[in-house]
Amino acid sequence: MVNADPKGVDAGPHFLDGDHALAEGALAAGCRFFAGYPITPSTETAERFAERAPEVGALFIQMEDELASIAALIGAAWGGQKVMTVTSGPGFSLMMENIGLAVMTETPMVIANVQRGGPSTGLPTLTAQQDMMQVRFGSHGDYNIIALSPDSPQECFDLAVWAFNLSEIYRVPVFIMTDETVGHMHEKVVIPPADRIRIVERNNYKGPKEDFRPYKFDCQGGHPMARAGDGYRFHITGLTHNERGYPAMTPEQNVKVLTHLMEKIDGNAEQIIRLEEDGLDDADVVVVSYGITSRIAIRAVHEARELGLKVGALRLITVWPFCEARIRELASRVKAIIVVEINYGQMVREAERCVAGRCRVVSVNHCGGAVHDPKVIVGAIKEAAL
Amino acid sequence: MSCPSSCETSCQSCGSEADEDTSVAGMLRMERMPHIWCPGCGIGSVVTSFVEAVRRSGLNRDKIAVVSGIGCTGRVAGYVDFDSIHSTHGRAIPVATGLHLANPDLKVVVFSGDGDLTGIGGNHFIHAARRNMNLTVICVNNFTYGMTGGQVTPTTPAGANASTTPYGNYEYPFSLPFLADAAGATYIARWTSLHSRNITQSIEEALQHRGFSFVEVITPCTTLYLRRNRLGDGVDTLQYYQDNSILKHGADTRETAIDFQGKMLVGKFVERQKPTYLDAVNATCARLIGDDYQLYGKTPPEKEAEKK
């Protein structure tokens, strides 16, 4: 790891919304190519990047649609740049096919989804967390990704930097699953000086040409890429391929490729999963939440504790890969796990799968357009603690 | 030019080309042969012209990248020995746009079929032309979706039979030179796969052109389009090209429509100069930041290393 390039770091205290903080995080992380298409409530990130690009020596391009935006990222990543785009519901749906290509070609990139209510055009200006399953399973075929969920503009900045680092290490698209409320909420954001921001640089292959392989199916990250123009004459394809990158369409090869794509994430889950825990040691009830919802959930947890209930909070900073081990461990010693989220019940399914009947699982859902009323969560805690 | 450090391949440290095999075979990934294309297919002729054009152009082969989409022509990226990306259906141009903008030293060439380029990818085609993006786009136009079994495309002539227009095509087809011209392309040529020397020359000019260059090559799909329309084999089609191609450089692109088995205008229709997308970006930024503005300007540690 190296220190951040100071050119991209606007160090000091700022008053920013989450969307703007995402752009600053990307620039601090060394992102120098942004292709995007306007969509509410994410557009401010693109606008900030477009405004800052000339002074940083970065390039912003507004493409003709989201299909083109994500495709351009794949090209630009193999051209040697760190790349990002930002979108929301409908645009995210349009990106799905080439998210699959990015996964298959093991192309590092960061995609932020500032979630809004759906389905379809839904609630363009109002908050939701309804794309949590789509981010994991939305493109066709089996695959694996990393998704993070910030709960504040400060965390939008911090997680943007970490997302770029993770995407470089594991050569996988990393998603920042924020939402309209965090995206449009102004708070204090402190950007540290460049020498306090640690960056994973692009790992470009430098060895002999005949030994270059764009892939290594060893279920690990850290494998080098080549930059177009450096003389390695790489080939990448969305077809099932061998380590040279050439098509190799057999069932046996698909086992190798798919196992690698899944296990390089799941096998390194301990390094990728970040959680924030509060009062879990003696808890009878655990409230699980992520993103903006965790800020309401934590208030409800504190109110319930004042009522004498033994309740703790678990905030998922990394949503995917899911914290299976932690949920299993908690399930064996608590009465109930409550999952609070702004959707019809998405991550609660993962919790139920991991709990496997060992404790109660309660979904406190909200169909989108607003955040929860903390009273509803307190009510659920009271009922679960009985 | 021979390399003073006598390296085996083209050398990054000295920037010179080693005595590399620049024959057609030397520019292909021969370990991947045989290719998937049918006997009589025109794609191979276009690939041969492309590598010949690269050789003649004298451009550094390592600074040329090839991007393709999906379909028979989409497989070109896998057979040519260049940095190459075989992307998704219709998305070759935006992938190429990203590759070029991330690394402006590269000349990025898109190989695309008519369905890939102007059906599913039509929006990207007109927008890259509009921006005068510095790309070379080669369209192998065989009037059919070959890989999926001979369906109608946006260029299939009216009346032609396709597997999804079994009673004849009742749609109006695109004329691609006209489309490219209207959208803003700054180099446009059309040939048939019979005109192999002209294709080579046009691709060479396109590689040297700054801006959006478009070379359309009309080719036979022997297995599907020809057979379904009872047009004989590949040789019969080359005879048809011979008898019906009308050479007209500088032709008004409004006259370039192709009727079923009708006459076809071929030649270099458009060649004009206009700032590229990146020229325009750089001019705007230099006005804003000053003359020392540099896209992806070196980082302080890189500058430090250079001084040492």
Image (cartoon, grey):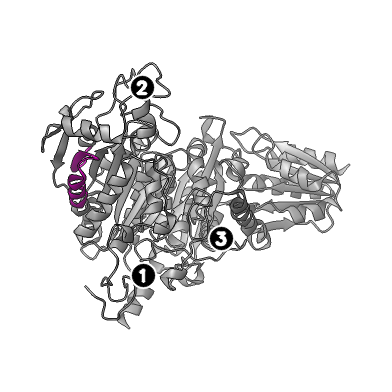
Query: What is the x, y in percent for residue B14?
Result: 28, 76
Q: Is residue B5 left or right of residue A168?
A: left
Q: Nearer the viewer, residue A172 or A381?
A: A172
* Residue range highlighted in magenta: B182-205
Q: Is residue B175 magenta?
A: no
Q: Is residue B186 magenta?
A: yes
Which is nearer the N-term, disc 1 or disc 2?
2
SS at circle 2:
loop
In the picture, the disc for residue B161 is 2
- Looking at the image, the residue that sits furthest to the right is A386
Amino acid identity at mark 3: Tyr
Instruction: Same chain for labels 1 and 2? Say yes or no.
Output: yes
Q: Nearer the viewer, mark 1 or mark 2?
A: 2
Q: Is residue B297 left or right of residue B272?
A: right
Query: What is the x, y in percent for residue A353?
Result: 77, 44
Q: Is residue A209 above or below residue B4?
A: above
SS at circle 1:
loop
Q: Mark 1 packing: few (<14 Cα in 10 Å), some, or many (20+)?
A: some
Q: Is residue A44 left or right of residue B230?
A: right
Q: CA distance from mark 2 to mark 3?
A: 49 Å
Q: Is residue A166 above or below residue A194?
A: above
Q: Nearer the viewer, mark 1 or mark 3?
A: 3
Query: What is the x, y in percent for residue A68?
Result: 40, 42
Image quarter in which the C terminus of chain A is found: top right
- The answer, for residue B228, to whether it is visible in the render is yes
Which subunit holds the residue at mark 1?
Answer: B
Which subunit holds the residue at mark 3?
Answer: A
In the picture, the disc for residue B299 is 1
Instruction: Same chain for labels 1 and 3? Say yes or no.
Output: no
Q: CA distance from mark 1 to mark 3?
A: 24 Å
Which subunit holds the residue at mark 2?
Answer: B
Residue on which disc 3 sits? A170
